[in-house]
Amino acid sequence: MKKYRIGPDGKATFAIVQAEDELAAIGMVLGASWAGARAMTSTSGPGISLMTEFTGMGYYAEIPAVIFDIQRVGPSTGLPTRTSQGDLLSIAFLGHGDTKNVMLFPGSVAECFSMATQAFDLAEQLQTPIFVLSDLDLGMNNWMSEPFPYPEKPLQRGKVLSAEDLKRLGGFARYKDVDQDAIPYRTLPGTDHPGAAYFTRGSGHNEKAQYSERPDDYQNNMERLARKFETARSYVPRPEVVEDRGEKIGIIAYGSSDFAVRESRDQLKREYQVRADYLRIRAFPFSREVHEFVSKHERVYVVEQNRDAQMLSLLKLDLNASHTPKLHSVRHFNGLPIDARSVTDDIISQEGR
């Protein structure tokens, strides 16, 4: 930060704060983001649990935030130095009531870096908390990587109205769906216009940000938030379709499982003459490519590092019901990084070979 975040006047353009706990950390992030800064924090599964209430506020009040979750084995203390992909379902719906959160799944240390940039852009474009789900395999082990390229694209701040914009418009309604994409416009504190101010609240509000307990105001707001989640499908990183040659079998994986799956595909072809197409999911909500990949294949194996097949569950919730019988689970959850042989043996067993 001291190398890259010093302004022309020689002063720091950043702040790093050691919070006393995870509740304070996410509270600081939301406060800083509301004020116009880009802010993030990091944690693991138990810390995510403590961030539940503030996450719900960020979702409902529509405040940007970035949270890195370095997943490790649970429940509770579990195996605190072992790796896992067990936080998907808890984060996807983290909050009280109806909540849906955007998640990114880096598959390498290079993507941990590049997806940080994407996460900040998404948080401001969508005005919502964005979760980046890494794991202890990526977070604690040594990895070889190409040098990280310094970001050259301008920051995507999203729909932020300036004083000049407000003079032209005459004012705005904080939670009004002007563009029919369910993403409203916002202003930042200190904007020099009398129409810039609004109340930010985690309680019921109408499109003008006024307190309201009217059933129609609440329902309209919640339906708009659901539509915004659908809009997010076109914003999040597309999946990586490693190969799609129309084979009968498809494999879906995400995160650090990528390396094992790539090697497993070679084993399947070399040892069993089984060819499988492969798609790596990089974000939730799922984009159309994920739906298309599943529809093209007779059987799709979903590879993940948790006991309860959490990614498979999210896919079943999202896909057309006629496609869900195609999905089969390949799970690895002993705390050690997933290996290719485990993937290969599980798929061959389910194939009846």
Image: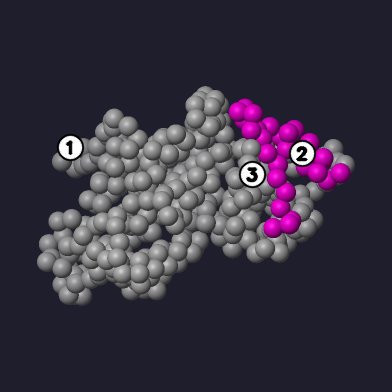
Q: Which residues are magenta?
A: 324-352
Q: Is residue 329 visible?
A: yes
Q: Earlier in the sequence, mark 1 or mark 2?
A: 1
User: Gap between marks 1 and 2, in whole Å?
Assistant: 57 Å
Classify residue 148 by image quadrant. Answer: top left
Circle 3 packing at 10 Å, graded few (<14), some (14-19), many (20+), is many
State the residue at coordinates (62%, 50%). Answer: 313
Q: Quick one: SS at disc 1?
A: loop
Which mark is drawn over residue 31? none
**Residue 245 as seen in the image, left or right of residue 152:** right
Q: Is residue 334 magenta?
A: yes
What colouring method underlies this structural image?
A: one colour
Nearest to the eye among marks 1 and 2: give it. Answer: 2
**Residue 240 as seen in the image, left or right of residue 170:** right
Q: Is residue 143 magenta?
A: no
Give residue 133's position: percent from left, percent from top: 49, 42
Q: Quick one: SS at disc 3?
A: loop
* Quadrant (top left, top right, bottom left, bottom right) of the C terminus: top right
Residue that label 1 marks: 10
Q: Is residue 266 visible?
A: no
Residue that label 2 marks: 346
State the residue at coordinates (20%, 62%). Answer: 198
What amino acid does circle 3 point to?
A: Ala
Specify the farthest residue to the right: 353
Residue that label 3 marks: 309
**Residue 312 as seen in the image, left or right of residue 197:** right
- Asked if labels 2 and 1 touch by Cβ distance under 8 angstroms, the answer is no
Q: Earlier in the sequence, mark 3 or mark 2?
A: 3
What amino acid does circle 1 point to?
A: Gly
Give the tally of numbered discs: 3
